[in-house]
Image: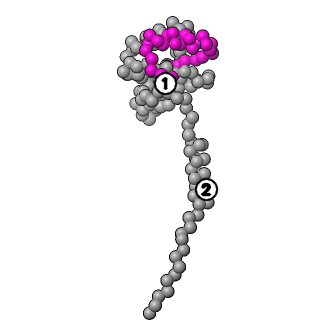
Amino acid sequence: MRFRNKPHRTPIINIVSLIDILCIILIFFVVTSIFRREEPQIKLDLPESSQAKASQQTTPEIITVTEDEKVYLGPTLITVAELGPLLKSKRDADPRARFALKSSKKAPFGIVIKVMDAVKIAGIDELPTFTAEPNEANPDASAYPAAAAATP
């Protein structure tokens, strides 16, 4: 008995359905992505405040104080001695420039005071601070930061 060999057809991949799926995934990522300002990639444990209010003003430049006493202005690591003159020069260049303080609750209080003194020397009267909003279900969990107005 002789079997007939069927001619082999090359498989066809339907690319149209793959492109549709790719477009849907792309739209999903664009819609759900959060566009943020560049900040140093530092994990901070922010203190909570029941009096915190979200700031409606333009985005300030962030002064970050870590628990290991490092100070950042935006993404740049600086010393406390450099902070005052740098803030003064930025404020002289743009009088509308705004700054905010984001400090870990484990940061030494002395370094935070030195940063606030440098801000005062630079002639900045108000320095909003970032705190975590209290979470009713889990009071130890940190929430997204909200700026609270505080003066140095």
The percent position of residue 152, horizontal first and vertical second, equals 50, 11
The percent position of residue 100, horizontal first and vertical second, equals 53, 19
Q: Which mark is residue 75?
A: 1
- Give the residue drawn at x 53%, y 8%: 122
Cα distance between the residues tagged 2 and 1: 39 Å
Which residue carries the number 2 mark? 20
Amino acid at pointer 1: Pro
The percent position of residue 47, horizontal first and vertical second, equals 43, 23
Amino acid at pointer 2: Asp
Residue 132 in the image: above or below residue 17 = above
As rendered, which of 100 and 151 lies closer to the eye?
Answer: 100
- Give the residue drawn at x 57%, y 58%: 18
Instruction: Give the residues drawn in magenta, as a range.
Output: 74-102
Secondary structure at badge 1 equals loop
Residue count near mark 2 (Cα–Cα under 10 Å), binned few <14, some 14–19, many ≥20: few
Image-based side of 28 in relation to 108, left or right: right
The percent position of residue 58, horizontal first and vertical second, equals 61, 23
